[in-house]
Each structure stands twice: as structure tokens, then as C-alpha cells.
Image (spheres, coloured by chain):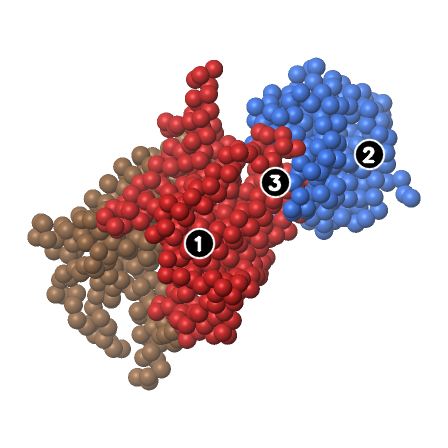
Chain colours: A brown, B blue, C red
Amino acid sequence: MSEFLNVVISIVFDGLAYAMILFIISVGLSVTMGLMGFVNLAHGVFAMAGGYATVAIMSQLGIGFLPALLCAGVAIGVASLVLEQTLYAPLYKAGELDQLLLSIGLVFMASGAFTYFFGPDPISVQIPDYLHGQIDLGVRSFPTYRVFMIAVGIAMALGLWISLERTLIGARIRAAVDNRPMAEAVGINVNRLFKLTFALGSGIAAIGGGLAIDILGLTPNFAIQYLVLFLIVVAVGGLGTIRGTFVAALALGIIDNAGKYLWPEGGAFFIYAVAIAILLWRPSGLFGRTD
Amino acid sequence: MSSTALQTSGLDKNFGALRIARNINFELQRGARHALIGPNGAGKTTLLNLITGVLRPSAGRIQLLGTDITGMGQSKRTRLGLVRTFQINQLFKGLSVLDNVCLAIAERTGVASSLLVPLGHHHQVIDEAMHLLHMLRLDGDAMQLVNQLPYGRQRLLEIVIALGQNPQVLLLDEPAAGVPSAESQLILEVIDSLSDDIAILIIEHDMEIVFRFAKRITVMMTGAILTEGTPNEIAADDRVRAIYLGDY
Amino acid sequence: MPSLVGSHTRRQQMQPTQNNQHPSRRHRWHLAEALPWVIAVGAYFVFPDYLAFGTQILITIIFAISLDLILGYAGIVTLGHAAYFGTGAYAAGMLSAHLGWNEPISGLVLAGTAAAVMGWISGLVLLRYRGLALIMLTLATAILLYELANTFEDITGGFDGLLGIHISPLLGKFDNDLWGHNYYWYTLTVLVIVFLAARRVVFSPFGRSLIGIRDNVQRMHAIGTPVYRRLVTIYTISAGLAGIAGGLFAQSNAFVTLDVLGFARSGTILVILILGGTGRLYGAFVGAVVYMVVEDELTKLSPEFWEFGVGLVLVLVVLFARRGLLGFITDMNELMHKARS
């Protein structure tokens, strides 16, 4: 295989793995912002909490990585409901600035709290043996964990897409994102629907956080460090669209990898330049409504 | 100088397949006292929004005092003397009554781009504002915050702000709707007393007001002009009667 | 939602206090306005060992005032104001480090100018947008600058910082001594000038029109305001002042790192202003002093306590004291007056 092709495959492959992390963590945020118009800078906290919960569950209960991930997802999803009920709900009708400030406050609190309990140093996670090493996919071999990551991301995107397009609840969510007053007028309880999707989105982000430990690392600074990136993915994709978030995550993930590979000194520059260009061109994002 | 203050020709507005304004040819004479009527959804407010630049027409042209303003921004049209009032409250609710009027006057007189001299030193702005407030008997409320002002008085303030902009063409969107009768009388008296140089177009549902005020009436229906004429002609028009008797 | 500010709606809570005063008196000085300056001068004599820290507080006040002009008055929500602070800091730093331009006052003027130009250019693009798109674009713009500075680390020094800044003595006489005496006065003088200018602007018809834009932008269009042009103007001014703050930062520390452009700085200054209270200029003073003193004390104790604490305070402010500490104090004052009468 030619050297050039090899490089391209590497860039796309690593970009894909990165994109899947971005997607899994950001998709819940897209729903929060699309459905309730809530500017939630604290969404990364769910992912961070999911990462720590995964590690804690593995060591406390002595169970494996994958079951621990699921437990973390469920636990964080349920816990996020308490947060939604007590702090977010009162601010749904408030301005963007209030929501932004409240959620920044939450990020700080989480960062301080996690430092207190887990220490400031990066922690690692014991991934199972069968996800270690390389796997041969015919053309060449790839790191198994990243292949797994991509598979999970695609499966999740498909699962979410199908449940949104094919189920009654999905139809209701689409109706509520599209035209909330109308949805309420035909008897959809948007608030309850939202609580459900909020918990689901947080739970998925928590799983994403657990999956990301091996690739992005995990410190109590995680939610602050990646806050901007998750927001950008959602804004570029368009609020409240799974397809948009997926495409944006793919584009930004691969561009970021390509940039860092081709121009190591200026790497992270690309992703923001592209994001700005897209937002200038389409302020409501690639798949956002333009009204 | 032409006798036309405002003219639209062939004005269309489409939202996708929806045509909310169709081939509107409308003319407002200098010094006119003109009323625009029609049932809800007839397109009156759409026409107003097209004229003031809130909406851009899909086709057609608009001329103000001989100048083509079709592509012009809202604020520029205002500076040429095209002034409107709003049907639902569009006041600066967090500011005092006096500040509301001062903003408009400062904008008209060009004072508003002054960066370093306090508003309090521009006496002519404050004096003119107080004078206008006095005219509409709002001077006693000058220091009230608008959101603490009764609704009827807010409607009066609407008129004061419009007058502060020194209109050449004044578009009044249901100026007296929902106002207690004492204040609505005051509003109508003030409108009656305005200089003949100002061309006035009033959108109104209250036929008593329309026939008391207007020298000409235009009737709109489903996004187009149905007919136009003197109050007597309109009152005698069978189609108009049908609309207002509800069996059109 | 139980709220200590009871009858106020959220929208009202954004209002600065001077709105219910007569326009012909509003701009006059009040006795209470002497207080911050008395404190600033007094602090020099009371805390002679903390003047370097005091200088950093004064710089933060300037930065917060610059944000108040666009956020508190014009209602522009930004998550990227560090872009202009950082531009000023790098301008002042690189003038000295690369060009050998060490005279501080002209250096500061150039820092402010560079930031104002940056504010003007970015403002021309950014201010065509509003709402969430604007927030995201300000955020992305600042990060883009950060990444640019990181990319060209041979010029900016990158993570390791820009070395080789040597600022000449002020007016040829007063050096940046180890205890920061001279720079305290230097910074305080600049703050006085910046504050006087900002105060002039907010009470001018121009400043009032900004409040009108924040309160009801639709109506401002209708009364003939060139809204976009006004916003670009105040954004440029604000960026220039932020650049002056950044320039002072670079000169007083003789060192600049990428932090000056970082998201944390944009976020922190927003928190400081909200904490003090927006749309009243003095909120910047209260917010900066309280935030930085508490940060200093708590960080000594343990950094994570500080992080948790500042987060908690922010949440409480948003839920219960949306007009900031200064607004909270005036509300309490009014309540007490009412209770007495």
C-alpha cells in the first residue's frame, strides 16, 4: 500500500474515533439546547462524572469495563434529573446569559468537587484484554479499542436515529423541537418528554465519558477543557438535530486530526477556523432551522 | 413637487408558496388622512411591515417623497421621515417615560451619536420631550418607568414617541385599541390637531374612528387591495358591507 | 422561585439603577462615588505589602469596565472578551521584546489601539449575528486567536511565555520597583482616566441609545437608530479598553503567556462583572475586589475549595441575586427604607 494512502487512512480512522467520542458526548447537549433552548455549558460534567463513575464502579464492585459503563450511564442519567429539576427548570424562560452563568457555575463546582474526591492527577481505566492490541481488518490492522469506539458510535447514532424516526416518543420529540407551542397544543407534555430525553442524553454522555478515558484521558478539568469543543459541535451541527450533531462531529473530528497531522504546530487552529466559517455562513448550524 | 408622499407599485410578498401580499398599488397623498381597513388577516400589518422595511418585498417598489426606498433599511427610512406606531407595545419598558421620548428625539436630531457629552447637557432634547409629553398630558408621568404605567397611558406614549420623530408620513397601527375612552378621545384629538403637512395612514377596526378621521379609505382583503374611495363610496360599496356584515 | 429581589422581573433585574433618575441630573456626581477612590488611595498606605496584588485588581477592574460597556449597557453577551485583553497584552509585550520599544505610556496607547482595531474588525463581522450564534462566534474567535498565538510561538513565546520585556521607567523616573509602588499609581491613574471616559460614554445620548438597544432593539430600528453601527462603535471602544488592561498586565508583570487569550480569562471576567453587577460601572469594582481577594485567600487554603466556592457563588447569584452584589445591596437598602416608612 502506498505511503500516501496509508496516511490518509490513518487520519480518517483516528478522526473517526475522535468524532464518535464527540458525537456520543455532544448529542444530549444538542437535544437540551434544541428542545428547551437551554445554553448548557455544564454538559461535559456528565461525561466527566461518567468517566469517574466507571472507574469507581469497576474498583468498588469489581465488575468489568463494559458493565461498569452501563451502570455509570444509568446512574448519571438518573442523577442528572435531580439537577434538571432543581436548577435548570427554573431558568428555562430566563435569558441565555443566566443559563450560561448558572452552567459555568456548575462546571466550576464539579471541577472542585472531583478534585477533592479524586485528586488533580489524570486517572486511567483498565480496559478488557480483548479490546487491547490491534485488529486486522483486511486492508491493514487498526487499534482494536478505536475500532470498538467507532462501532459503538455508529451503533448509537443508528439507534438514536431509528428511535427518533420510528417510535412514537421520537415523533413527539421531533414535533416538540420543531414547534413547541403546537406540540403542547396537541397535548404533548413537553416538559416530561424533555426530562426523559435530558436523562437519556446525560446518560449517553456519561457512557461517552467512560469510553473517552483511554483516548482523551480524564482529569477533574475535563469538563472545562472540552466545554468549548462540545458546544462548537452542537452549534455547527444545528440545535436539536441528531443528524447535524453526527455530521458536525465527523467533520470536526476528521479536520482536527488532519490539521494536527499535516501541520502539527497549528493543528487546533483548523477546527475553530472551520467552525467559525460554518457559523458565519449558517448561523443556526448545518442542519439547524434558519428562521 | 409631486403630491404623492408614499407610493407602492406591484408589491408582492411570498413566504414559500404562501402569498401574503399580492400586487399592492397604494398611494398616500401629502397631508392625507387615509384609513386602511379590512378583516383580520387581510394583510394590513403585512403592508405596514413592507412599507417600513421590517419585511422585504418579493417584488415591487416603494417610493417615499420621491425617493426609492425599496432596498433601504428600516432605520434609514425612519430618518427620511417615515414613522410608525406599534399595535402591541414596543416601548422601552425598563426606561422612564421621559427617556423613551428622549431616545427618539436624540435620534432624529443626530444628538444620539454624541459620545462624550451627557444627555443632561442637551437641554433642547429634554425640553422638546417635556413639551410633547405635556401636549398629551403625560408630563406628570415623565419619571415613571414604562412598565409601571397603565396601558392607556402607554398608548399615549406611543404617539408621543412618533411625534418626537418629526414624521412626514405617519403610520398609525390601531392607535386607540384597548384604550379607555377618556384617553382614546385624547389620542384622536391629538391626531386631529396634527399639521396638514403630515401624511397620515391609520389602520383601524373601529369604524366610528375611521369615518370620523379619514378622507379616503382603502379596503384590503386576503392580501390584496379590494377597493379604495371616499368614506361615502366605501360605505355604499356592497362588497365592503358584505365583509363587515360577515357574509362575504 | 423564591427570590430576594421579589417583585422584580428578570428583565428588570438587568436594569442599571440610574434609569429612574431625571436625565438632566443623572450624570451628576454623588458623594458615594468618592468611596472606591478613597479606598484605592487608602489601600496604598494600609496594605503596602500587597501593592503588586492591588495593581492586578486595578487591571481587572479596567477589564471588567470594558466588558460592562458591551454586556451591561449594550446587552452583547460574549464569551470571548479575552481576545482583546490578550491582543493588548501581546502588543505591549512584543513592542518591547521584539522592537525594543520600552516606553510604557506610548506602549500602552499602542496596546489599546491594537486591541481596538482587532475589536473593530471582528466586531464588523460578529455583530451581524445575535443570540446563541453570537455567543458561539465570540467564543470561537477568541479561541482562534489563542490557537494562532500558540501556532506562532516563535513570536509569542507560546506556552512558555514571552520573555525579554523590559519596560523603561515611567516618565523616565519611576521604575517598576519590587514592591510595585510606582505601578500601583500608574495603574490607578489609568483606571481613573478609563473610568471617566466610560462614565462620560454611558451618560451620553450614545450611551442611552445602547440601553435602548438592549431593552428593545426592534423599536430602536423603528426610531431610526443605526443599530449595527452603534454596536460596532461600542464594541471597538470596549475592545480598546480591554487592550489597555491587557497592556498594563504585560507591563506590570513583564511577562505574557497564552493565558491572556484563554477561555478561562473570558469566563472569569464575565463572572466578576456579574458578581459585582452589570450596567452600573461600579459593579466592576465590587466584583473584581471581592473575587480576587476571596480567590487569593481560598487558593492558599486549597485550589479546589476556591473552584467549588466560586461555582457555588455564581449559581447562588444567578438564582437569588441576579443584579449582582451591588444590586443586592441597593435592594436591601430600599427594603430597609420601606420597612422604616
Q: Residue at x 81, y 41 (%)?
A: B6
Residue type highlighted by circle 1: Tyr
In the displayed orientation, state which residue is furthest to the bottom: A2
C48 and B157: which one is in front?
Answer: C48
Element marked by disc 2: strand
Q: Residue at x 45, y 45 (%)?
A: C41
Q: Which residue is mark 2?
A: B199
C184 and B82: which one is in front?
Answer: C184
Can marks 1 and 2 be said to lie on one chain? no
Residue C293 visible:
yes
Q: Which residue is mark 3?
A: C203
Cα–Cα span, label 1 and label 2 = 62 Å
Q: How would you rate the neighbour count of disc 1 (Cα within 10 Å): few for under 14, some for 14-19, many for 20 or more?
A: many
Residue C340 vertical position relative to residue B28 in the rendered view, above or below? above
Q: How would you rate the neighbour count of disc 3 (Cα within 10 Å): few for under 14, some for 14-19, many for 20 or more?
A: many
Chain assignment, label 1: C
Residue type highlighted by circle 3: Phe
Q: Single out the mark in the foreground, 1 or 2.
A: 1
